[in-house]
Amino acid sequence: MKWLEMRQLFPNQFVLFSVLEFHQEGTRRFIDEVEPIRAVADEDARTEFDQAGPGKLVYHTSSKVCIIRIRRRKRSRVRRKKTK
């Protein structure tokens, strides 16, 4: 199901769904195909977001496009002591 169809099926509410297909542009992933699981109450959205497993998201359908911003952590260098 396309994101536009999801918006029409669940207007103006949070939805838990599985990501089936996306494309990436730079540090942003645009969600193309989704499989809805269920609607989520506004007060439960944060909890559901935190508990969503890999490949699952909670997102509000008021957004015209479903985008995930990818944050990459800087790698830190570990200094090791020289052994003799």
Image: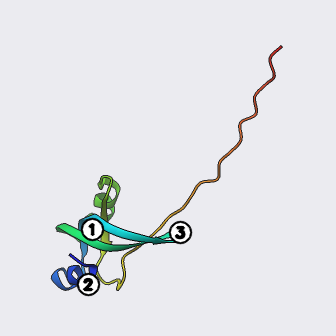
Which residue is identified by label 1?
A: 43
Which residue is identified by label 3?
A: 27
Distance of label 2 from label 1 (alpha carbons):
24 Å
Question: Amino acid type of disc 2?
Answer: Leu
Which residue is identified by label 2?
A: 4
Where residue 11 sits in the image (x, y, percent)?
Answer: 21, 84
Q: Of callouts 2 and 1, which one flags the residue occurring earlier in the amino acid sequence?
A: 2
Q: Residue at x 36, y 69 (%)?
A: 22
Mark 2 vs mark 1, foreground winner is 2
Where residue 82 sits in the image (x, y, percent)?
Answer: 81, 22
Question: Amino acid type of disc 1?
Answer: Glu
Q: Dot 1 surroundings within 10 Å: few (below 14), some, or many (20 or more)?
A: few
- Residue 21 vs 9, above or below: the answer is above
Q: Quadrant of residue 83?
A: top right
Q: Of callouts 3 and 1, which one flags the residue occurring earlier in the amino acid sequence?
A: 3
Question: Amino acid type of disc 3?
Answer: Thr
Q: Residue at x 75, y 28 (%)?
A: 80
User: In the picture provided, is 70 more to the left or to the right than 41?
Assistant: right
Where residue 53 sits in the image (x, y, percent)?
Answer: 30, 52
Q: Quadrant of residue 72?
A: bottom right
Colour style of the rendered protein structure = rainbow
- Quick check: marks 3 and 1 in contact, CB under 8 Å? no
Q: Of callouts 3 and 2, which one flags the residue occurring earlier in the amino acid sequence?
A: 2
Q: Secondary structure at mark 2?
A: helix
